[in-house]
Amino acid sequence: MTAHGHESDHGPHHDHDHDHDEDGYAGPATLLVAGRTLDVEIRLTGYFQPLDGRYHWYGRLAPDARLSALVGGQPVPVTVCTPHGRAEGELSDPDLWQRMRVAGTSTPPFSAMATPGLEN
């Protein structure tokens, strides 16, 4: 049991910080950012937010010196392409391990559960 009163589950579809079901993807991706194309490793998750009627996806990229040098830790628009789809988002705030955050509000770049309002 965890401090949240739940059994520990480290699977890709579970996060104790949210009270809703989540979808996700972990693996290779291609980023189109600042006029460049970069192959990266990425971990994404997302959920449908009934309050705004939109799908929110987000995640972190594996540390990549090329990407850090290119964007310098500043928020920049990005296109994320995975084997399952493509979506527009924004890169921002690297963490202490230089993993850049990526987020978007749209149809995600991965297969999502059938969710009201999500256009797949």
Image (cartoon, grey):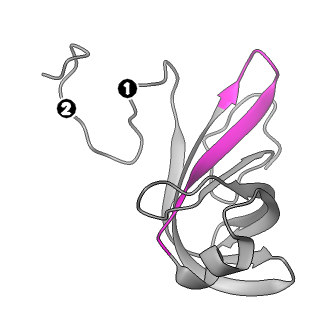
User: Measuring 61% from the left and 85% from the top, which residue is drawn there?
Assistant: 66
| Count of marks placed on residues | 2
Image side of residue 58 versus residue 36, left or right: left
Q: What quarter of the picture does the N terminus occupy?
A: top left
- Which quadrant of the structure image shows residue 82? bottom right
Residue 93 locus on image (x, y percent): 62, 52
Which residue is drawn at the image coordinates 38% and 36% (left, top)? 14
Q: CA distance from mark 2 to mark 1?
A: 9 Å
Q: Which residue, given by chain and number where applicable, does mark 2 sit on?
A: 8
- For residue 30, above or below residue 60: below
Q: Main secondary structure of the magenta part?
A: strand
- Structural crowding at the residue carrying mark 2, measured as other residues with C-alpha within 10 Å and reported as few (<14), some (14–19) or many (≥20): few
Residue depicted at 72% across the width and 66% down the height = 85
**The magenta stretch spans residue 79:** no
* Residue type (three-letter) at the residue carrying disc 1: His
In the image, 14 versus 113, the foreground residue is 14
Q: Nearer the viewer, residue 9 or 98?
A: 98
User: In this image, 22 relative to 6: left or right?
Assistant: right
Please state the horizontal and vertical placement of residue 53, each as a whole percent of the image.
81, 23
x, y percent for residue 73: 66, 62
Q: Residue furthest right?
A: 35
Q: Which residues are magenta?
A: 48-63
**Pointer 2 or 1: first along the chain:** 2
User: Which residue does the numbered mark 1 point to in the structure image?
Assistant: 16
Q: Is residue 33 left or right of residue 2?
A: right
Residue 83 to residue 113: above or below: below
x, y (%) of residue 32? 78, 77
Question: How many other residues sit within 10 Å of disc 1, few (<14), some (14-19) or many (≥20)?
Answer: few
Residue 54 within the segment the image draws in magenta: yes
